[in-house]
């Protein structure tokens, strides 16, 4: 039983998105008794995706209180060192695991699965559907769906990613908030021709790069991450063939494992492709609607987005419990606590594109020299402290603890 003052069993909450932020909030809200519905346009929980990491005492505290810290450790990638190579595969720089993988690293899909399994019997998940319209009223939010019947909820939370539909419905078109960082990123599964086991290799040419890694220990599989510098492109995010054409043009003639990666792209049934970008929005809440995770303060890569989303979910649920479900009080406190923290983490991602794909040969050499310096033990420890500074730059209150 929860403390009656902090009992949220009277509160109905619709969460849009079942990637990471959505199930994280569902888990936290259910601890206080809230009645939660998660709607997800995909047919199942979103498995797969990049490996994500957690670092520092704030992440550990939140994941521990959510009851999932030990399971994350049990299912972590155990990723080892990553090596920058020349076109012939010769090692140039050896990067220690902690430099890239934080305190603990797990596949995004594994993390989502952990939280889904913890909530599936206590949370209503509606797959294969999405929000069509929202009407915010003094007494609740009237929601229509693409497929299901209309319903009313006390609160609606947009946790539907960088290209949030919920944000567009309530706060306006994405173009007002998305900041493009002159690079694109793609990911595709490739054959493990290099025989990698929980290690990775990074190769860069001016304005483009490919990293191949094996994260799960399967000797037959590997994943390729592609980054390239570009003007902003116009393309349909649902058009796989168009995305393949863009990548084939941009990576034509790439050395090292370029032919292998291009062949894998040509035959792939699924790839990830997106701009390296961030969301910058002045307000995270409007009436009875709030934004969480990438929908409100996302960064494509390098901004510790998963850690920020999980912390944000913990804070939002905690503030609602402190306020006894009063969304006005809770939303104001959530915005106040999370805004600067999220912005600080976003700052670490601004150089993600040039980090992988420096624009010139000279900059590639300069980056490699910097890597060698950072890979030394004293500098690696210094870099880890700098990275953790962003991840821990938030003071969390003592939220109510459900019995």
Image: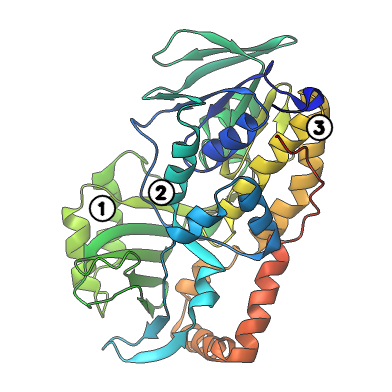
Circle nearer the viewer, 2 or 1: 2
In front here: 244 or 392? 392
Q: Position of residue 343 (x, y in %)?
A: 71, 54
Q: Residue at x 59, y 63 (%)?
A: 349
Which image quadrant is residue 246 in?
A: bottom left
Report crowding for label 1: few under 14, some 14 to 19, many 20 or more residues within 10 A (C-alpha).
some
Report crowding for label 2: few under 14, some 14 to 19, many 20 or more residues within 10 A (C-alpha).
some
Residue 183 in view: no
Mark sitting on residue 393: none
Q: Is residue 231 left or right of residue 11?
A: left
| Mark 2 lies on residue | 109
| Mark 3 lies on residue | 322
Marks 1 and 3 sit apart, C-alpha to C-alpha, by 49 Å
Q: Earlier in the sequence, mark 2 or mark 1?
A: 2
| Mark 1 lies on residue | 244
Marks 2 and 1 sit apart, C-alpha to C-alpha, by 23 Å
Circle nearer the viewer, 3 or 2: 3
């Amino acid at each position: 039983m929860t403390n009656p003052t902090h009992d949220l069993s009277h509160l109905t909450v619709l969460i849009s998105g079942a990637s990471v932020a959505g199930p994280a909030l569902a888990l936290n809200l259910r601890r206080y008794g809230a009645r939660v519905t998660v709607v997800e346009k995909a047919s199942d929980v979103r498995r797969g995706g990049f490996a994500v990491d957690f670092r520092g005492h704030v992440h550990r505290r939140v994941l521990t209180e959510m009851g999932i810290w030990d399971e994350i450790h049990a299912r972590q990638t155990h990723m080892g060192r990553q090596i920058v190579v020349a076109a012939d595969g010769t090692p140039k720089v050896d990067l220690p695991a902690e430099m890239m993988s934080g305190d603990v690293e797990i596949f995004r899909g594994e993390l989502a699965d952990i939280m889904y399994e913890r909530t599936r019997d206590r949370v209503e998940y509606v797959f294969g559907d999405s929000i069509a319209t929202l009407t915010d009223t003094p007494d609740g939010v009237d929601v229509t769906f693409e497929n299901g019947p209309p319903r009313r909820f006390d609160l609606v939370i947009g946790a539907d990613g960088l290209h949030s539909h919920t944000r567009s419905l309530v706060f306006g078109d994405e173009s007002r908030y998305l900041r493009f960082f002159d690079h694109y990123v793609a990911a595709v599964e490739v054959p493990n021709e290099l025989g990698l086991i929980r290690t990775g290799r990074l190769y860069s040419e001016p304005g483009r790069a490919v990293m191949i890694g094996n994260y799960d220990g399967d000797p037959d599989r590997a994943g390729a991450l592609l980054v390239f510098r570009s003007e902003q492109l116009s393309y349909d995010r649902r058009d796989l063939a168009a995305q393949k054409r863009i990548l084939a043009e941009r990576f034509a003639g790439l050395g090292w494992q370029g032919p292998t990666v291009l062949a894998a792209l040509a035959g792939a049934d699924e790839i990830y492709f997106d701009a390296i970008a961030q969301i910058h929005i002045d307000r995270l809440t409007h009436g009875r609607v709030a934004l969480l995770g990438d929908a409100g303060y996302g960064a494509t890569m390098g901004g510790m987005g998963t850690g920020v989303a999980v912390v944000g979910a913990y804070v939002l649920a905690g503030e609602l419990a402190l306020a006894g479900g009063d969304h006005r009080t809770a939303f104001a406190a959530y915005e106040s606590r999370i805004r600067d923290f999220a912005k600080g983490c976003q700052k670490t991602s601004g150089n993600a594109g040039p980090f992988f794909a420096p624009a010139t040969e000279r900059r590639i050499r300069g980056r490699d020299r910097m890597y060698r310096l950072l890979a030394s033990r004293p500098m690696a420890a210094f870099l880890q402290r700098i990275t953790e500074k962003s991840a821990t730059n938030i003071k969390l209150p003592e939220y109510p603890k459900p019995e």
